[in-house]
Image (cartoon, helix red, strand yellow):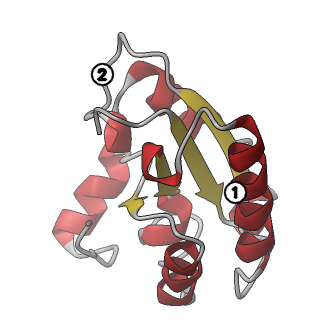
Amino acid sequence: MKNIKLVVIIQCAIAKRRCSGFYCMDCFYKRKGGFVDYPKEKNIQYMMFECGGCCGKEISSLLGHLSRKLKEDDEIKRDEVAIHLASCMVTDNHHYDRCPHIDYIKQIIDKQGYKNVVEGTLFAKISEKKRKSGEYNSYSRN
């Protein structure tokens, strides 16, 4: 993750109704959870948006807009963008289980030309413990 200049976090629209995204942002700036591999001293830009609701099709429009703006600016290339699918989308947690549309969403991201996709942002200790005990489902992270 050394050549990354922009991190995009995509949050679940349903979870976003009751979550401000604070912990995802906090993990990014503190380089914890899904962001531990990013160097702290490097100035990496950060943005968040939501999937748009089930089935996540709005991601295509949002990434298309982002791609056009990156091309206009010509400072950040697609291979310098990392897209994090927020933990509310990719894990079983207190909101609900993993997004049933996650594979479709990944296909959209790939079709838009973004290859650096990471599953997860915040890995809460309590939720991780519940996954290990079998109370929550556990999924492998890429």
In the picture, which quadrant includes the N terminus? Answer: top left
Q: Residue at x 55, y 80 (%)?
A: 111
Q: Residue under label 1, please give it.
A: 67
Q: Please say if 93 is above or below 39.
A: below
Foreground of the two, 54 or 14 = 54
What SS does tag 1 mark? Answer: helix
Q: How many numbered discs, if any?
A: 2
Foreground of the two, 115 or 129 = 115
Asked whether, in this view, residue 77 is left or right of residue 12, the answer is left
Q: Residue at x 74, y 83 (%)?
A: 57
Q: Residue at x 46, y 65 (%)?
A: 93
Asked whether, in this view, residue 114 is left or right of residue 32, the answer is right
Residue 92 in the image: state x and y as whole percent: 43, 72
Foreground of the two, 115 or 95 = 115
The earlier-in-sequence mark between 1 and 2 is 2
Rendered image quadrant of residue 90: bottom left
Rendered image quadrant of residue 73: top right
Q: How many other residues sit within 10 Å of disc 1, few (<14), some (14-19) or many (≥20)?
A: some
Asked whether, in this view, residue 132 is left or right of residue 74, the answer is left
Q: Please say if 2 is above or below 103.
A: above
Asked whether, in this view, residue 79 is left or right of residue 61, the answer is left
> What type is the residue that disc 1 sits on?
Ser
Rendered image quadrant of residue 42: top left
Q: Residue under label 2, please give it.
A: 39
